[in-house]
Image (tube, rainbow, N blue to C red):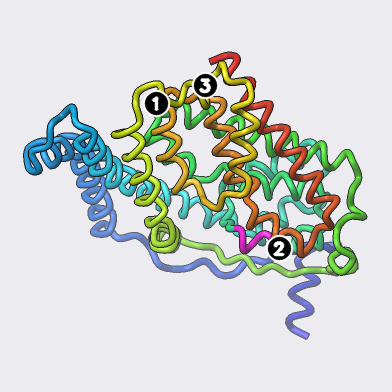
Amino acid sequence: MKTTEKINSCGCDGGVCALSAPVSQKKITMQQLSLGFAGLAAWYVLYLQLLPFSNFFAYHLLQLDQGSHLGASIQFFVYDTPKVMLLLTLIVFVVGMIRSFFTPERTRMILAGKRESAGNVLSALLGTVTPFCSCSAVPLFIGFVQAGVPLGVTLSFLIAAPMVNEIAVVLLYGLLGWKIAALYMATGLAVAIIAGWVIGRLHLEHHIEEWVREIRMGEQIIVEEKLSWHDRMRMGGEAVKDIVGKVWLYVVAGIAVGALIHGYVPENFMAAIMGKDAWWSVPAAVLVGIPMYSNAAGIVPVVQALLSKGAALGTVLAFMMSVIALSLPEMVILRKVLKPTLIAVFIGVVGAGILFTGFLFNLII
């Protein structure tokens, strides 16, 4: 009876209802705050030493010639690997704290009942800060359907979440600069918003698997724990341990491939294959990218190396987007909840958006 009284007193008329839990009493001490600032200062000093150390390691310690292929590859690898890991650790920690405000349950509650258009924009933005991996696509999709989130709004989230995340943005920023990182983020969000809106306009809800559509949610109670800043910092540390622990091998492998391209592929070699003048390069890059299995951590260092060898920006961005947003493993996972027709429409609409992005940037940049 006590539980029933608490539920009824929350003021919900059905759907998703949030209850508040007591606030955690743990607070940040001055000692912890001082350690945090000291750690940030140490991070910055270490970051500034990476370039001189990489040059010293490759050209003085190993005594490689500065103009040699091997020397350029070693210097690239020794510089970019710790650089990316340092940037990744800092950004994942900050985003982990931000994500403590946006759990998947909280996201579902925010999007429940939202109309399309505004809902597509909101879901794409929430997708960038909500914890997501391919293995969580099915439970998230089911939860959104249960909460009454429109199909197009749900798919905007599922497109944005893997494609426009902190790993992609921080790697692009660290390796290619803030302009390309901002460009990728803006175009990725645009593809997610527009593709979700288009699919919503097609009214393909009958192509969701029957067992998913038959689920009835009823009233759902979400107990929200009010976290202190100490708790949020702890969650940031856990995010670093979890995410960086999973992707570091992809980072090293991607930078190793990039280092080989950087050191051994001649300047402007990629211009003939992935340059602006090769009109077929954008669709070819998308077709090559779809069956590949990688994430941003593994593909961004390769993207950097391709650009340095003459590949066009639009072609490279299209390649990266197709690898991350339309990976074959994710399509296989989504097949559990979507019928083949809807998956084909999903690939076609998102692929068209990626193609448009590639051709547009090859035209204007």
Q: Label 3, on which residue?
A: 275
| Residue 253 visible to an observer of this rendering | yes
User: Taking 313 as reference, is 284 left or right?
Assistant: right
| Residue 238 visible to an observer of this rendering | no
- The amino acid type of the residue labelled 2 equals Val
Whether 125 is drawn above or below 358: the answer is below
Residue 192 point in image, percent of width and height: 69, 39
Residue shown at the point (80%, 47%) measured from the top left: 344
Whether 182 is drawn above or below 110: the answer is above
Name the mark on residue 138: 2
Residue 258 point in image, percent of width and height: 37, 40
Residue shown at the point (63%, 45%) measured from the top left: 290
**Would you say the magenta stretch is mainly helix, strand or loop?**
helix
Task: Tell us which disc is closer to us: 2 or 3.
Answer: 3
User: Taking 362 as reference, is 66 left or right?
Assistant: left
Q: Contact (CB < 8 A) between labels 1 and 2? A: no
Label 2 vs 3, first from the N-terminus: 2
Q: Is 357 in front, or is 241?
A: 357
Asked where in the image residue 186 lies, by quadrant, the reply is top right
Q: Label 1, on which residue?
A: 309
Label 3, label 1: how many angstroms apart (C-alpha)? 10 Å
Q: Residue furthest top?
A: 364
Q: Contact (CB < 8 A) between labels 3 and 1? A: no
Residue shown at the point (24%, 46%) measured from the top left: 43
Label 3 vs 1, first from the N-terminus: 3
Whether 241 is drawn above or below 80: the answer is below
- Dot 3: element: loop
Q: Residues within 10 Å of mark 2 (few under 14, many from 20)?
A: some
